[in-house]
Structure formats: C-alpha cells, structure tokens
C-alpha cells in the first residue's frame, strides 16, 4: 500500500459541497495533514470504488448524513510541499454538489467536528488551502 505522504503518484479524492440555504457543511479534520482545520467533507477513493460511491461513503463516514449527488462541482488539485520543497502531499480532488436526504449530523470517522457555517463568514474559520476559493468559484457559477 502506498503512502499519502511523499506519494509516487497523486492521490485521488472526492469532496462534497453541501448547502443549507446560505450555509455550507464543513468538517474539522481529525488527522494530518491539516489536523484541526476545517474543510469540505470527503476523502480518498478506494481501489475499485466508483467516484460517486466514494463521495456518498465519505460524507456518511465523516458527517453521519446520507446525500445524493446533484452535480459535478469542480476538480481541484492540492500540492503541499515540505520545508525542503519536496512534494509531501499531492491530491487531485473531484468535488460534487450534494443534497442531504437523510441521516443525523454527527462527527465520525476521522472528523473532529462538523458544522453548518455561513458561506459569507468563511474568512472567520481556519479552513484548508483552496477550500474558500472552491466554494466561491462554485457559487459564482451558480448565480
């Protein structure tokens, strides 16, 4: 099994943009990288798993919610160099807009907390690099 740290190849992941009016669902990360920071729910795609199945699984594991996919939102690449400039993490993230269809909101799996947060107050949170840009660009296209 290859490591996510210093990977031989980029790691494929999925993320969910889930809205409730003017609020978005955020997960406080329970593990590195970015432990304690807030981001979109999501995670790595397992070998043999379809992207759509991965996002449904990841949202359920991290938030306790069942969702359905509305549409593909964006593709985002996150490169994270270490202090020497070597690529410590490299993710290609496929984000989907999703809608809640069931479940009970609760932190689970590798999330420390989950919350609905006003989109216009994202600047007040410690969010992972690129998350605010992904949300802003997606909302600008929806208008």
Image (cartoon, rainbow, N blue to C red):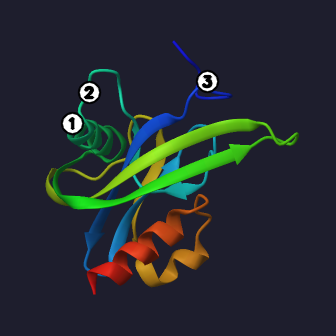
Q: Which residue is mark 2?
A: 49
Check the image and report above or below for 31 versus 69.
Answer: above
- Left or right: residue 75 compared with residue 100: right
> Looking at the image, do the residues carrying marks 2 and 3 touch, with CB atoms under 8 Å apart?
no
> Which element type, helix, strand or loop, lies under badge 1?
helix
Measure how far apart labels 2 and 3 are at the Cα level. Answer: 20 Å
Measure how far apart labels 3 and 1 are at the Cα level. Answer: 25 Å
Q: Nearer the viewer, mark 3 or mark 1?
A: 3
Q: Position of residue 91 (x, y in %)?
A: 53, 42
Alpha-carbon neighbours of circle 1 within 10 Å: few (<14), some, or many (≥20)?
few
Residue at far left of view: 101
Picture quadrant of residue 95? bottom left
Question: Can I make out residue 111 in this image?
Answer: yes
Q: Which residue is mark 3?
A: 8
Q: Position of residue 115 (x, y in %)?
A: 40, 62
State which quarter of the image contains the C terminus.
bottom left
Mark 3 or mark 2, which is nearer the start of the sequence?
3
Check the image and report above or below for 27 versus 126.
Answer: above
- Left or right: residue 12 compared with residue 20: right
- Left or right: residue 69 compared with residue 86: left
Alpha-carbon neighbours of circle 2 within 10 Å: few (<14), some, or many (≥20)?
few
Q: Which residue is mark 1?
A: 53
Question: Can I make out residue 98 in this image?
Answer: no
């Amino acid at each position: 099994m290859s490591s996510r740290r210093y990977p031989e190849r980029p790691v494929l992941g999925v993320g969910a943009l889930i809205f409730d009016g003017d609020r978005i669902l955020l997960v406080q990360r329970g593990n590195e990288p970015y432990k304690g920071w807030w981001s979109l729910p999501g995670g790595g795609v397992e070998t043999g798993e379809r992207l759509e199945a991965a996002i449904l699984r990841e949202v359920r594991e991290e938030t306790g919610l069942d969702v359905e996919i509305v549409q593909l939102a964006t593709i985002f690449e996150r490169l994270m160099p270490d202090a020497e400039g070597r690529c410590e993490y490299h993710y290609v993230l496929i984000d989907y807009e999703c809608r809640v269809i069931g479940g009970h909101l609760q932190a689970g799996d590798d999330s420390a907390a989950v919350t609905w947060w006003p989109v216009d107050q994202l600047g007040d949170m410690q969010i992972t690099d690129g998350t605010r840009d992904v949300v802003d660009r997606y909302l600008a296209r929806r208008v």
